[in-house]
Image (cartoon, rainbow, N blue to C red):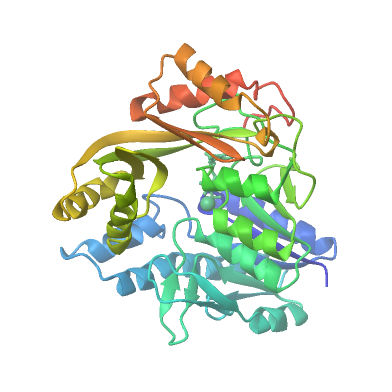
Amino acid sequence: MRLRVLKFGGTSLHGRQNWERVVRRVTSYARRDHSILVVVSAMGRNESPYATDTLIRLADSFGDPTPLRELDLIMSCGELISAVAMTGALRAAGLQATALTGGQAGILTGDRFGEARIIRIDPSEPLRILRRGHVPVVAGFQGVTEEGEITTLGRGGSDITAAALGVALGAEMVEICTDVNGIKTADPRLVSEARTIDDMSYEEMFQLAQQGAQVVHPRACQIVMAGNVPLRVRSTFNDHPGTTVTEGRLNHRRPVTGVTHVADLAQIRVNGEQDETQGVFGILADSDISVDLINASPDEIAFVVDGDLLEPAQRALEEAGYCARGRSGCAKVSVVGAGMRGVPGVMAQVVRALKDADVDILQTCDSHLSINCLVPGDDMARTVRALHSHFELDRMGGTGDEQ
Ligand code: ADP
Ligand code: MG
């Protein structure tokens, strides 16, 4: 069976005209003799009636915060509404289609509501539907626990659903259909000259996603990498070939492939002896606070947390007797590229580019595939643009198309 998994995000499922494009994409593959499995997100964003944010507001509108279990129940409705609507649209176009919840599609998860991890996939139901010649339309972003509780997989979770089903069913490709032409050298909302990258390795895609390129969820990258299923990111709205992600050769054409950013972070600095490192991170782990960009020197430990976790993190550390100084309103900007491995001087170039752009670097960190800089949030866009142009990403490779 030549199976393609097509995932359509919220931005693709917004407005009649977009739905027509989605249906055209599905029917054109079906006509070319592919079996298709569709994964959908909730329709639209923010104010849209069935968008996830709207559903959360409804649940929260009575005052008390909604328990996580109930929050997952209501959040899972958006995708389900999309899935059922999609089967209607596909039927109208002459295809047979069957809607499935994540649980019905065999996605079994742990019980951490709001951030559930997939434990196992039992693809027998989607397989049965495919064998009948129907298109299974699976509600993305959700699963079910062994006990039958509905869970959600966290923001961007529909990408994970598509990747996991693609691997479980041995798909020839997983296509993430979205509102941009592919994976770009930077977020086009910040850098209008960002280019679409033709191809890259799983490892590079994972790094870009992990460092903030929200176009594909990092776990989805790990899943297709482990299953060795090719992934394609492309636009729902045109025929641009998009970005193909495979095992491939690592992309050594240039040291830097892309620039990513994460906004709304906070820096915490703790005075202390080196041997207290374990203590600080143990306290934060106990409070379920994850940390990033760790720099430990003999007399100071600096790290980064999500902006809204600054207060709880400081409180937990101070209760344990540490002096924890916080700075909110920070952003992480990273240059990412498999080609920087073993190339000397990339960090020096980053520092120079930011000096020329008059940006203060609050902290840096590097791995063999990325260099991260913490900068004041107000300078984030300028930092991304400065690095994008310093590494000439607007001129190299890919296509300079606008979407
Ligand atoms: P969907 O609703 O399809 O899941 P997302 O909003 O999750 O869409 O992802 C698409 C968005 O990701 C784009 O509109 C773009 O602004 C953003 N984005 C961030 N970084 C990148 C990047 N490096 N390449 C492409 N898009 C990016
Ligand atoms: Mg998304």
Q: In which quarter of the image is residue 119?
A: bottom right
Q: Position of residue 358 (x, y in %)?
A: 41, 14
Q: In this view, does 67 lie above or below 354?
A: below
Front-lying residue, 34 or 69: 69
Q: Does 168 sit left or right of 213 as displayed?
A: right
Q: Position of residue 15 (x, y in %)?
A: 52, 50
Residue under the image location 74 percent in, 47 percent down: 244
Front-lying residue, 380 or 29: 380
- The answer, for residue 397, to whether it is visible in the render is yes
Q: Does 173 sit left or right of 362 as displayed?
A: right
Residue under the image location 49 percent in, 74 percent down: 143
Q: Does 367 sit left or right of 374 as displayed?
A: right
Q: Which quadrant of the rendered structure holds the C terminus?
A: top right
Residue under the image location 52 percent in, 17 percent down: 353
- The answer, for residue 236, to whether it is visible in the render is no
Q: Is residue 54 above or below residue 201?
A: below
Q: Position of residue 216 (x, y in %)?
A: 58, 50
Q: Position of residue 238 (x, y in %)?
A: 70, 42
Residue under the image location 50 percent in, 65 percent down: 141
Q: Is residue 70 above or below residue 403?
A: below
Ligand 1 shows up in the quarter that is: top right
Q: Can you name the residue that lies furthest to the bottom here?
A: 147
Front-lying residue, 394 or 313: 313
State the count of labels. 0
Q: Which quadrant of the rendered structure holds the N terminus?
A: bottom right
Q: Is residue 25 above or below residue 250?
A: below
Q: Does 340 sit left or right of 379 as displayed?
A: right
Q: Can you name the residue that lies furthest to the top here?
A: 356
